[in-house]
Image (cartoon, rainbow, N blue to C red):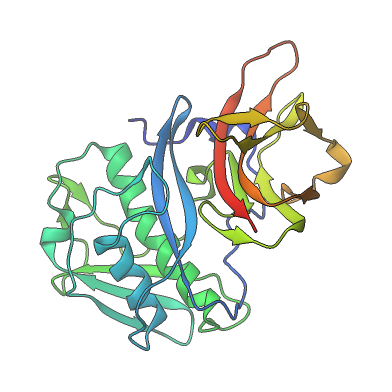
Amino acid sequence: MPESAASAAARLPAASDGVEKLSDKEMVPVYWMQANNDGVYLYREYANTQSSGDPVTDAVTYLLNGEPGKEGWFTYLKPSNDIGVSISADNVITLDLPQRVFSAKLDEGLARRSIQQLVFTGTAAAANAGLLANGTTPRLRLLVDGSTNATVFNDFRLESEYQRDASLMAPIWIIDPQNGVETASGTVKLNGRSISFSDGIYYQLEKGTASNDWAPIDEVERINPTEVAEDGSFTRDLTLAPGEYRITLWGQNSGSQDKIARVTSMFEVR
């Protein structure tokens, strides 16, 4: 696994690593890895979990012990409930975990991604709960059994602090509808973010059939460049009747029909 993501050369949007906004959702943001033909990237879900009163602890506990909401998402971090968390006034989140969490033997690329799972999950949970002060980029200080700069994943040496590495976020990301959600019939918001593809971003919407298969309900659609904001985000309204749906997004470059960084989300409209 290469240390740097293949998408780094494809110009990730500058604001793609910005932390989550304050939310009244009674769920915690958790980041998982997923492998595809283009590499191994990070994807976020909002997970339901029993609250301990500390959202960062709740999010990390779910990452280490919970089940991802989508097939193909995973982590190499091992289970543990022995989690210590504190947050300083200058947005440094200190996370103390036992060595057993890092007992997998990984190469440098996968070790780096696994650490970033903790960085993204910890900073997302803090931001989502309104625990971060304005004006300072959040960082994660990772301790292992109380020690700094520990060696984990067999021979990977930890740095003193970490910030989010935007190049490890998925090239295309479906924010809404989240996989597995139920939504009311009528207008369903498609929200996503993407790196820049020379031919643009496309999507296909399918509906579940009585034979437990998927049937396209429309032609392949293209997200117009004017719909994509400077930070790579885009939104489109979908008018959908009740049923089960699957939406697939991908990028294409000029002169090629290859579907790059294809991602899917399955959801139900009631």
Q: In this view, does 102 lie to the left or right of 168?
A: left
Q: Which residue sits furthest right?
A: 226
User: Is residue 164 shown to the viewer in this render?
Assistant: no
Q: Where is residue 58 in the image (x, y as percent from the top left)?
A: 35, 76
User: Is residue 71 shown to the viewer in this render?
Assistant: yes
* Rendered-image quadrant of the N terminus: top left
Q: Position of residue 13 (x, y in %)?
A: 67, 46
Residue at image point 69% right, 62% down? 184
Residue 266 figure quarter: top right
Residue at image point 74% right, 55% down? 188
Residue at image point 66% right, 38% down? 195
Q: In this view, does 97 lie to the left or right of 166?
A: left
Q: Position of residue 264 (x, y in %)?
A: 56, 39
Q: Is residue 127 left or right of residue 176?
A: left
Residue at image point 20% right, 40% down? 106
**Toward the viewer: 249 or 137?**
249
**Toward the viewer: 39 or 236?**
236
